[in-house]
Image: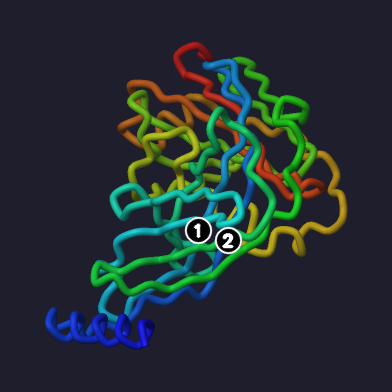
């Protein structure tokens, strides 16, 4: 009887509020562990990237919060609409973050993580993903190498072509460049205030990254991008910028991120 009474009260409350909203939906979930070497702080850490293809039949502007929850470890993260980033990848619109962190940069515990997307009316949609391997120590892996010569940025990595994530001096994400010189230059929306903020990273690992990269790939040769070329790509970068280098490690199914590299010290 207690359960029935609670359910009845909830229905009455919903009617009293005039709630006729439809619940949001999640059609796809992407997650990736990103190992980070912060050159400025001299630290190593792990970050978790989580993005969803989500929509609300009442309009996506009514989506309000994204929750990532590990019940067994008693951990949860909340990403509000003002903090999440959005990007288009594989013909779909994604929302989420690259910047979930454990205290002191610790490894993320293994287990099942629930992803809950909430609308402003309180309705939710839920999916989940598993982290089966805590992964290597971030200080023990090999990050992409960067070599600056005569204003050219040479980047090499053991996996697929790395990317440069470019920020203004005040930390706003502007664009990404493939290290082969291709400009991915669509700015992702969102706060972009943290080093791993740009949602443009979504297509790099690919939603089915483990399946897409089942065999080791040859090293990616260093192909230069120029400081001047990046600065000229957007007026906001003319006063200076910094960049991080991202690469996907197919053998470990992890992202690798190293930086920042300030443009003023590289000319």
Q: Which residue is mark 1?
A: 51
Q: CA distance from mark 1 to mark 2?
A: 5 Å
Q: Position of residue 21 (x, y in %)?
A: 24, 82
Image quarter where the N terminus lies is bottom left
Residue 193 horizontal side relative to residue 17, left or right: right
Quarter assignment of residue 37: top right
Q: Give the mark nearer the N terminus: 1 vs 2.
A: 2
Is residue 32 positioned above or below 239 on the image? Answer: below
Q: Position of residue 147 (x, y in %)?
A: 67, 20
- Within-10-Å neighbours for mark 1: few <14, some 14–19, many 20+: many
Do the CB atoms of the residues marked 1 and 2 lie less than 8 Å apart? yes
Q: Position of residue 152 (x, y in %)?
A: 60, 23
Which residue corresponds to the image point at 73% horizontal and 44% vertical from the top-left? 134
Q: Which residue is mark 2?
A: 30
Is residue 81 positioned above or below 52 on the image? Answer: above
Which residue corresponds to the image point at 85% horizontal and 44% vertical from the top-left? 218
Residue 158 horizontal side relative to residue 34, left or right: right
């Amino acid at each position: 009887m207690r359960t029935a009474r609670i359910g009845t009260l909830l229905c009455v409350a919903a009617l009293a509020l005039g709630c006729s909203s439809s619940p949001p939906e999640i059609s796809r979930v992407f997650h990736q562990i990103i190992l980070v070497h912060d050159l400025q702080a001299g630290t190593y850490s792990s970050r978790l990237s989580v993005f969803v293809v989500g929509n609300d039949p009442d309009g996506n502007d009514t989506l309000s919060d994204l929750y990532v929850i590990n019940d067994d470890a008693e951990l949860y993260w909340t990403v509000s609409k003002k903090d999440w980033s959005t990007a288009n990848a594989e013909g779909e619109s994604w929302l989420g973050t690259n910047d979930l962190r454990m205290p002191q940069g610790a490894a993320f515990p293994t287990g099942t993580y629930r992803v809950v997307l909430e609308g402003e009316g309180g309705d939710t949609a839920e999916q989940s993903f598993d982290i089966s391997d805590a992964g290597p120590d971030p200080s023990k892996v090999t990050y992409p190498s960067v070599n600056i010569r005569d204003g050219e940025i040479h980047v090499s990595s053991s996996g697929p072509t790395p990317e440069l994530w470019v920020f203004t001096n005040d930390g706003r994400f502007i664009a990404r460049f493939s290290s082969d010189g291709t400009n991915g230059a669509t700015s992702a929306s969102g706060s972009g205030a943290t080093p791993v903020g740009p949602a443009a990273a979504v297509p790099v690992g690919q939603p089915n990254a483990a399946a897409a990269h089942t065999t080791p790939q040859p090293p990616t040769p260093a192909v230069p991008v120029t400081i001047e070329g990046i600065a000229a790509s957007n007026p906001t970068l003319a006063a200076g910028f910094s960049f991080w280098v991202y690469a996907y490690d197919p053998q470990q199914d992890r992202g690798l991120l190293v930086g920042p590299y300030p443009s003023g010290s590289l000319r």
